[in-house]
Image: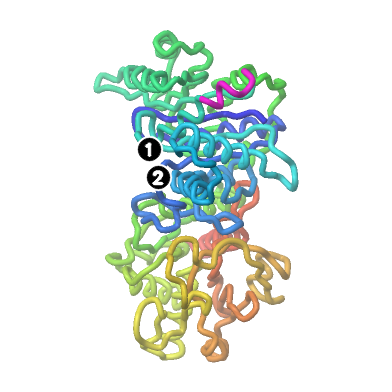
Amino acid sequence: MKYIIITGGVMSGLGKGITSASIGRILKNRGYFVTAVKIDPYLNIDAGTMNPAQHGEVFVLSDGAEVDLDLGNYERFLEINLNARHNITTGKVYRNVIERERRGDFLGSTVQIIPHITDEIKASIRVAALEEVNHGQQADICLVEVGGTVGDIESMPFLEAVRQMRGELPRHDLALVHVTLVPVDTMGDLKTKPTQHSVKALRELGLAPDIIVARSDQVIGLHTKKKISAFCDVPQQAVISATTVPDIYQVPMEMEKEGLADVLSEYLALDRRVPETDWYRVVMNEYTSRITVAIVSKYGIEDVYISIKEALKHAGRALGTEVQIRWLDAESYDTHQLGDVDGILVPGGFGNRGVEGKVAAIEYARVNKVPYLGLCFGFQLAVVEFARHVLGWTDATSQELGEGKQVIAILPEQYEVSDLGGTMRLGNYPVTLVPGTLAYSLYREETIVERHRHRYEVNPQFIRDLEQAGMIFSGNNGNRMECCELADHPFFFATQFHPEFRSRPAHPAPPFLGFVRTCRDQRTRAPR
């Protein structure tokens, strides 16, 4: 097993996750099996209870683990399925060590950061690296992204563990990539001092970068590379310019041009293979049409819905259709803003805020025959809207939202739940689709597997009433309704599951593909 450690300096949000995923992609294009680990230095056990407005999207893995959004990027770029072991947090590490101490595993030793915490970190990395990927194939290379920035007190034990790994592994089995900022001053000059200080901070911890990925809004030229090379003691060819690009899927191609794969091959003693370019052709397919999709949500932050944004992009690329997103605040938008959109999407969410705005958007889509895609909460509110305005149950609501005719009820197994973390209906569950329905035509198979994250379901006592009024429940898991649709509509489809989590650039999620196709076809037939 060979390891590539990715650290960051100067400031957070530079794009270590995309850098890590892109490194993995260029190695995968050379035929190597790559896996990835994300280290998050926060004390939370996982991302499940975090506010997405602060932390970003909570991504759900196939085994139900609620993790950082960077693991979604790993899955999309590398086309693999990860599990809970691939997300290491301070909370997990300390919990494991304390549980072992309580059992007496340390035989009376004083439990300390070194060696006990660092040993646990190294063991966790090794276990995750050995998890099988790609139908039983073990990875050749493991990417390890260390969250936060060098100098953060929370990251110290993890960086110490990396320092120890470097000493324990053979020389060609570990490479360290450091991502730094190269800002541009008011005169347009690139400034290398932040990178120099970041590398100095890294060295004070006993680590030195093998490769520096320099993030900037401008291309970093030869003069600046020479300066970074001289002051940071890395070869000039190991200073990689990472310029801001319009689309994240262009990043691996830019790194290819910079020769990153060759530098890594030298450090890790890998065979120099000719890259496969099919993936690049898929992700950069040209657009021949354009649509506008309104996403009606209570969060105006794109990172909260990054998987939805990417899934729309995947479907658009496959169909040669550029998808422009109009983000609408569910609490303050006006339905007139929906008048010129080609499709409406209501994503998942929790709580009362913005509910009525979402219901109004769903009613607009249903009545005006605008293509609609509802996800999780967007599925539940589609049922609420239908009950209110078709069945005439004006007080129809969800048990989550308060009093009224609760057409959406809490799952029976959720009644006794007291801990909020990791207790929802999470991860992969099979869904049986009804032949002859839109759902069946989208997936073209009778049984599918999709990822879930919810505590509520369609109330079983109202299913027959809803069906008799015209709502079609076209997918189920036993007595649980998983998707709904309307027959007299060009595309009205909603799912309790999250198809966006399994969407990949070369394999778009079927509901998104159908949604974007209908939006495009409607616009083509009746341009606005």
Is residue 237 part of the magenta span, yes or no? no
Residue closer to the observer: 466 or 490: 466
From the viewer's perspective, tell me whether residue 296 is left or right of residue 456: left
Quarter residue 165 falls in: top right
Residue visible at 72% across and 39% down in the picture? 138
Residue closer to the observer: 19 or 156: 156
Label 1–label 2 contact, CB within 8 A:
yes
Amino acid type indicated by mark 2: Tyr
Q: Provide residue 392's location: percent of width, then percent of height.
A: 41, 91
The image's mark for residue 42 is 2
- Quadrant the C terminus occupies: bottom left
Q: Which residue is mark 1?
A: 154
Q: Provide residue 464's location: percent of width, then percent of height.
A: 57, 90
Start-end of magenta stretch: 164-171
Amino acid type indicated by mark 1: Glu
Q: From this view, report whether residue 391 is shown above or below residue 360.
A: below
Q: From this view, report whether residue 506 is shown above or below residue 413.
A: above
**Looking at the image, is mark 1 or mark 2 earlier in the sequence?**
2
